Image: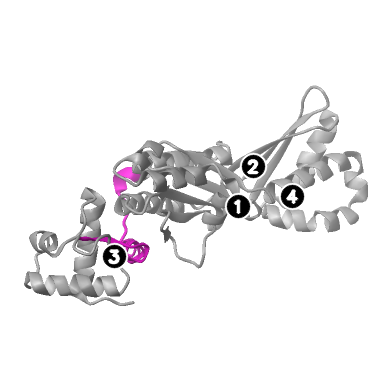
Amino acid sequence: MKLSERKNQILCMAIEEYIKDCAPITSGSVKDKAKLECSTATLRNELNALEAMGYLKQLHTSGGRIPTAQGYRYYVENLLSNASASNGELEEVKKLISSRTTSLTEIVSGIAKIVSHATSYPTVVMMNGIENLILDEFKIIPMLSERMMVLIGTKSGYISQEMAIKASPGECQDASNYLTKNFKGESIGFMIDNIDQLEVGMKSEIKAFQNVVNSLVDGLKKLNNTRLIDVHRQGSGKLLENNDIDKAKKVLDVLDDEEKLADIMQMQGQEEIQVDVSDDGSVVKAPICISGNKLASIGVLGPQRMDYAGIASALKVVIDSLKDLKGE
């Protein structure tokens, strides 16, 4: 619902003050802090209207008001439309992302750690776009005890897998060359979808290392179907500061529930930054897209009353950094 300029100003200011002080909103407090040319009676009417519209609620008949989930949602959506990244904060993220010799899981986990540190709230990252990664090279290295290490180089970092299969150094090298030659520049999803058809026409070439290729593809399929969730809890203690203890505990419980986290971290629509606000808490989340391909989702979890402006700025840093990454 579109609010008038005055209602918008009153609501956003009231929520910001409540986030800062945890004090119920009254017409008197709004009058003291908002530079509006109107009487206390007019402000009271505006607060009554905002309550009737569902943005505020009264805890007691004669007491002040506090924001509702709908009020927080309006505030955050209004805030996010103007979110901007700090140039000073971009460097650490850019340095991490630009390292092509770094494990992809380390890159994504590092991003989550930076955001958690910047916001002082628990941060969750869920990798769910492995199939979009663009392949660069394969290195298959034989190890002891009939095992091998596979390094899958992509434009965005490498993925490592250890496989229990026996193969000679020559077979490992041939399999590496074969996969690199046929799939360099293609996505992992393309490789998974087309490997069987390619093998039909090249049986003689891959016969000697068929087991290596099959095991690798099976491993990629499993990885692609697995939700890799990484939780950084540096800000967990802040949940208990000046907040409802029961609601804080609900957020902490969610951090231990992988199924709930997976549902919460799903992105809807095309917005860069999204917010879900409920009576139990909030999550501000954004997609992690590298080289134009979605790799993961990152979200900051907390109570309704949290620093949305700081969180939006931190996520904007990640988004703007990734936009500058060309993946070359």
Q: Is residue 98 visible?
A: no
| Crowd around label 4: few <14 · some 14–19 · many ≥20 (10 Å) | some
Residue sitting at x 28%, y 66%: 56
Q: Is residue 88 magenta?
A: yes
Residue sitting at x 32%, y 52%: 305
Label 2: element kind: strand
The nearer-to-camera label among 3 and 2 is 3
Indicate the quadrant containing the N terminus: top left, top right, bottom left or bottom right. Answer: bottom left
The nearer-to-camera label among 2 and 4 is 4
Q: Which residue is mark 3?
A: 57
The answer to the question of whether label 3 and label 2 lie on touching residues, with beta carbons closer than 8 A, is no
| Crowd around label 3: few <14 · some 14–19 · many ≥20 (10 Å) | many
- Seen in the picture, residue 232 relative to 48 is either above or below; the reply is above
Label annotation for residue 217? none
Give the magenta-colored segment's residue range: 64-89
Label 4: element kind: helix
Distance from Cα at disc 3 to Cα at disc 1: 38 Å
Distance from Cα at disc 2 to Cα at disc 1: 18 Å
The nearer-to-camera label among 2 and 1 is 1
Q: Which residue is mark 2?
A: 153
The answer to the question of whether label 2 and label 1 lie on touching residues, with beta carbons closer than 8 A, is no
The nearer-to-camera label among 3 and 4 is 3
Label 1: element kind: loop
Residue 80: x %, y % from top left: 34, 61
Distance from Cα at disc 4 to Cα at disc 1: 12 Å
Label annotation for residue 128? 1
Whichever of labels 2 and 4 marks the residue nearer the N terminus, that label is 2
- Seen in the picture, residue 27 relative to 53 is either above or below; the reply is above
The nearer-to-camera label among 3 and 1 is 3
Q: Is residue 46 magenta?
A: no
Distance from Cα at disc 3 to Cα at disc 2: 54 Å
Label annotation for residue 221? 4
